[in-house]
Image (cartoon, rainbow, N blue to C red):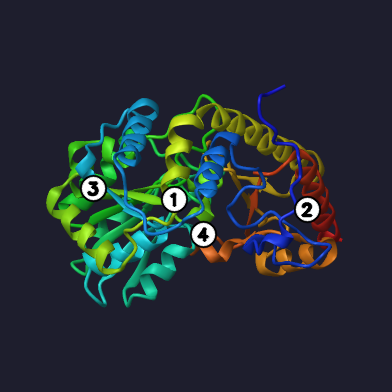
């Protein structure tokens, strides 16, 4: 029995939660936030701030920098200097800033697909063109087509790569050698890498994430990294993140861009939530990752036993499962809609994630066991009904 409660199902329909803006008899295993209450240590810190009663303009204090520095040094072996960190209200605002500040209109931005769908929004909405390097799959495992990656990086119109580490939606933890090779290719063709590492603390017990900037001196020199406590500690609504840039010239561009876009100042609760997470939340995080690993294993077990036509991609990071439904359907759009209509289960459809997402569904397993079992039963029933 753990120290923390991950079993209580908490109703969210009355909180204007985006994920739960669905039908009364539907359940959501879609959007990437958790169904767990934040750690008591974090809630206590926020309550203390709440009790002050005044929620005015807020500075970024020294303890915020120290929280990031201590966490990344202790857990991930990455030494970060204070001046290398910039506050941002979120990873996506920071990515959109990078697209605007580090590229010119009509230039190309490289992505490894399937990949987090909002990357495409940040690229297209800012007048740039996404260039997809589709990752081939062999025996359920995704790899990088290095020849294709180099050819697309070599295009003089390609100026930025948006990278996901760990990779959403497939859950891949990239190793040091892979990261270093990406860095070498991008450096050769003057392509900056923005590494979105928001999922980095949600990893299976015993597994390790490697920061992109730690893979080599080259990776550190050419990259912008986005961190946040929001995925690991379920704090997305606090709008808090950090941008870490080793190179001083690149850092100045990002600092200038974030300030121009007015996304470099914290709200009243952003600092306290972050500091509490990174200084007092470690025990909660460890238990949560173990709980989620058991959830993912349970889904794999039931799917293998009852609907083996669905193949789940091996993963070691994130609380998401990427499910290959190609033996069930030619259209995950049709399958996802059918499952929702017949059972009320809401999943995320793979085509959102670009090339290679066809015929896949994504399931969020960060929820109490009772909710997981409910969703799993609906999924199995829906797939069986669909297959007739």
Q: Which mark is residue 312?
A: none
Give the image quarter of residue 61: top left
Residue tagged 3: 245
Q: CA distance from mark 3 to mark 4?
A: 31 Å
Residue tagged 2: 379
Label 1 vs label 4, nearer the camera: 1
For numbered disc 2, what is the local secondary structure? helix
Of the pair 355 and 373, the residue shown nearer to us: 373
Is disc 3 in contact with disc 1, using a CB cutoff of under 8 Å? no
Is disc 2 in contact with disc 4, using a CB cutoff of under 8 Å? no
Mark 3 or 2, nearer chain start: 3
Is disc 2 in contact with disc 1, using a CB cutoff of under 8 Å? no
Residue tagged 4: 356
Residue tagged 1: 270
Label 3 vs label 1, nearer the camera: 1
Q: Taking 343 as reference, is 191 left or right? A: left
Of the pair 243 and 83, the residue shown nearer to us: 83
Mark 2 or 1, nearer chain start: 1
Mark 2 or 4, nearer chain start: 4
Quarter placement of the C terminus: bottom right
Q: Position of residue 384 (x, y in %)?
A: 84, 55
Label 3 vs label 2, nearer the camera: 3
Mark 3 or 1, nearer chain start: 3
Q: CA distance from mark 3 to mark 1?
A: 21 Å
Of the pair 206 and 14, the residue shown nearer to us: 14
Q: CA distance from mark 2 to mark 4?
A: 22 Å
Label 2 vs label 1, nearer the camera: 1
Crowd rating for badge 2 (residues with CA inside 10 Å; few <14, some 14–19, many 20+): many
């Amino acid at each position: 029995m753990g120290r923390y409660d991950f079993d209580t199902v908490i109703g969210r329909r009355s909180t204007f939660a985006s994920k739960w803006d669905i039908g009364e008899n539907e359940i959501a295993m879609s959007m990437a936030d958790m169904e767990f209450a934040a750690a008591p240590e974090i809630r206590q810190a926020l309550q203390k701030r709440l009790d002050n009663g005044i929620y005015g303009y807020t500075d970024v204090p020294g303890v915020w920098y120290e929280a990031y520095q201590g966490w990344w040094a202790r857990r991930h072996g990455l030494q970060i200097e204070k001046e290398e960190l910039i506050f941002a209200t979120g990873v996506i605002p920071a990515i959109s800033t990078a697209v605007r500040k580090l590229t010119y209109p009509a230039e190309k931005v490289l992505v490894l697909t399937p990949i987090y769908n909002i990357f495409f929004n940040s690229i297209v909405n800012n007048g740039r063109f996404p260039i997809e390097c589709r990752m081939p799959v062999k025996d359920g495992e995704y790899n990088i087509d290095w020849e294709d990656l180099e050819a697309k990086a070599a295009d003089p119109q390609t100026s930025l790569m948006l990278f996901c580490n760990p990779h959403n939606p497939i859950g891949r933890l990239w190793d040091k050698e892979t990261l270093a090779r990406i860095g070498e290719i991008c450096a050769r063709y003057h392509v900056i890498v923005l590494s979105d590492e928001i999922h980095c603390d949600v990893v299976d017990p015993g597994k390790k994430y490697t920061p992109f900037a730690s893979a080599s001196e080259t990776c550190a020199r050419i990259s912008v990294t986005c961190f946040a406590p929001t995925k690991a500690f379920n704090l997305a609504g606090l709008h808090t993140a950090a941008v870490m840039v080793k190179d001083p010239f690149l850092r100045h561009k990002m600092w200038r861009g974030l300030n121009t876009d007015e996304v470099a100042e914290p709200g009243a609760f952003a600092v306290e939530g972050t500091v509490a997470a990174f200084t007092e939340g470690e025990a909660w995080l460890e238990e949560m990752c173990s709980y989620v690993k058991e959830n993912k294993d349970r889904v794999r077990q039931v799917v293998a036993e009852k609907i083996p036509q669905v193949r789940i991609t091996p993963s070691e990071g994130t609380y998401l499962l990427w499910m290959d439904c190609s033996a069930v359907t030619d259209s995950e759009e049709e399958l996802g809609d059918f499952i929702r209509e017949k059972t009320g289960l809401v999943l995320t459809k793979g085509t959102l994630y670009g090339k290679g997402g066809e015929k896949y569904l994504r399931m969020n397993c960060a929820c109490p066991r009772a909710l997981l079992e409910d969703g799993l039963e609906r999924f199995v029933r829906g797939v069986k009904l669909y297959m007739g």
